[in-house]
Image: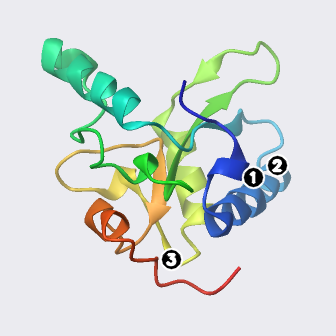
């Protein structure tokens, strides 16, 4: 099962998420709260997500096969979020919420939002800017300040 643990996420991203979530709580106390839905996932889990979109294009959530996602490296170089309504516990996938969260976390110039991608919008996705799965596969580290 894919991880939701911040401990499985690159420390820089985990700290950025914590800061952004805290700022969210202060700025939007009445809105649904962000929470991490995915950090690390295995190649097998990645392939299952990929196949889901092959079998039914309406259920497509990724273009990446196993090893082709920044989630497939440890620690994970990407994370996904969702929002939960504190009153009724229901998930909220409103684009407006993702945009607001992206505006907060992407003030950090080292982080990008999948909702800004051109070919495949991935609103729940956040990761290192200018860092690709090929970099991770070669063992190259993101060009970021030391945590």
Please name the residue that numbered disc 1 is placed on. Answer: 21
| Quarter of the rendering containing residue 3 | top right
- Residue depicted at 29% across the width and 45% down the height: 121
Marks 3/1: CA–CA distance: 17 Å
Residue 27 screen position, x and y as percent: 78, 55
For the N terminus, give its image quadrant: top right
Q: Where is mark 3, residue-wise?
A: 110
Judge from the rendering whether residue 95 lies leftward or rightward of residue 103; answer left or right: left
Lower sequence index among marks 3 and 1: 1
Q: CA separation, marks 3 and 2?
A: 22 Å
Give the residue at mark 2: 25
Q: Quadrant of residue 108?
A: bottom right
In percent of width and height, residue 101 lies at: 60, 52
Q: Are marks 2 and 1 in contact (CB under 8 Å)?
A: yes
Residue placed at 23% from the left, 38% from the top? 65
Helix, strand, or loop for circle 3? loop
**Mark 2 Cα within 10 Å, few/some/many (few <14, many 20+)?**
some
Of callouts 3 and 2, which one flags the residue occurring earlier in the amino acid sequence? 2
Circle 2 — which element? helix
Q: Position of residue 79 (x, y in %)?
A: 53, 48
Q: Is residue 127 above or below residue 57?
A: below
Q: Which mark is residue 142?
A: none
Of badges 3 and 2, nearer the viewer stands 3
What is the spatial separation of the Cα atoms under label 2 and label 1, in whole angstroms? 6 Å
Q: Quadrant of the C terminus?
A: bottom right
Is mark 3 in CB contact (under 8 Å) with mark 2?
A: no
């Amino acid at each position: 099962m894919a991880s939701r643990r911040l401990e499985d996420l690159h420390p820089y991203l985990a700290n950025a998420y914590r800061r952004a979530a805290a700022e969210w709580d202060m700025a939007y106390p009445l809105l649904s709260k962000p929470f991490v839905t995915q950090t690390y996932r295995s190649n097998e889990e990645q392939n299952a997500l990929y196949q889901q979109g092959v079998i039914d294009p309406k259920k497509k959530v990724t273009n990446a096969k196993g090893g082709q996602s920044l989630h497939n490296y440890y620690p994970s170089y990407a994370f996904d979020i969702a929002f939960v309504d504190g009153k009724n516990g229901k998930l909220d996938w409103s684009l407006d919420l993702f945009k607001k969260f992206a505006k907060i976390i992407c003030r950090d110039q080292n982080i990008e939002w999948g909702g800004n991608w051109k070919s495949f919008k991935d609103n729940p996705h956040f990761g290192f800017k200018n860092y690709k799965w090929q970099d991770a596969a070669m063992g190259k580290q993101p060009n970021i300040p030391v945590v």
